Amino acid sequence: MNEFIPPQPPRSFRVVLDLSKAAKRLDVVLLAALRDQKENLNLHTISRVAFKKLFTEGRVLIKGQRATVSSGVAKGITYIDILGY
């Protein structure tokens, strides 16, 4: 089975989530993933207010489409791009 990897937008930071079970809210798993990564220190130390602002400004994308904080995340690999990083 071939896995489709969406192209990464320019000037964005990509987070790859590999979940063993589906998550009901994207914001919870994405914030945890950002806190765990060491590649982008601005996102590693982002405040909750600034994190929420990323969603309201439409800067968080799943498969190239705007995500919301309450977007569900399927089991398996999900590619999330954060624009401007």
Image (cartoon, rainbow, N blue to C red):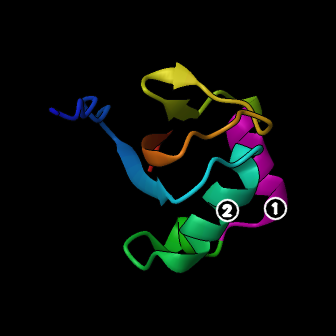
Residue at point 67%, 62% (across, down): 31
Task: Categorize mark 1 by other alpha carbons within 10 Å: few (<14), some (14-19), many (20+).
Answer: few
User: Horizontal placement of 81 versus 68: left or right?
Assistant: left
Q: Looking at numbered disc 1 in the image, what kind of residue is underneath it?
A: Arg
Residue displayed at 69% across by 36% down: 72
Quick check: marks 2 and 1 in contact, CB under 8 Å? yes
- Furthest-left residue in this view: 2
Q: Which residues are magenta?
A: 46-55
Tell me the mark number nearer the camera, choosing from 2 and 1.
Answer: 2
* Residue 50, magenta (yes or no): yes
Q: Amino acid at mark 2?
A: Leu
Closer to the chain start, of discs 2 and 1, is 2
Q: Identify which residue is drawn at 68% across, 42% down.
A: 54
Give neighbour class at mark 2: few <14, some 14-19, many 20+ (Cα, 10 Å). Answer: some
Q: Position of residue 34 (x, y in %)?
A: 56, 66
Which residue corresponds to mark 2? 31
Q: How much space separates mark 2 and mark 1, taking CA atoms?
A: 8 Å
- Rendered position, 10 above or below 48: above
Residue reaching furthest to the top: 65
Give the residue pinned by disc 1.
48
Where disc 2 sits, the SS reads helix
Occupied quadrant, residue 1: top left
Picture layout, residue 44 above or below residue 12: below
Q: Label 1's element?
A: helix
Q: Position of residue 85 (x, y in %)?
A: 44, 51
By secondary structure, the bulk of the magenta-drawn segment is best described as helix
Inspect the magenta stretch and tell me whether residue 12 lies in it: no
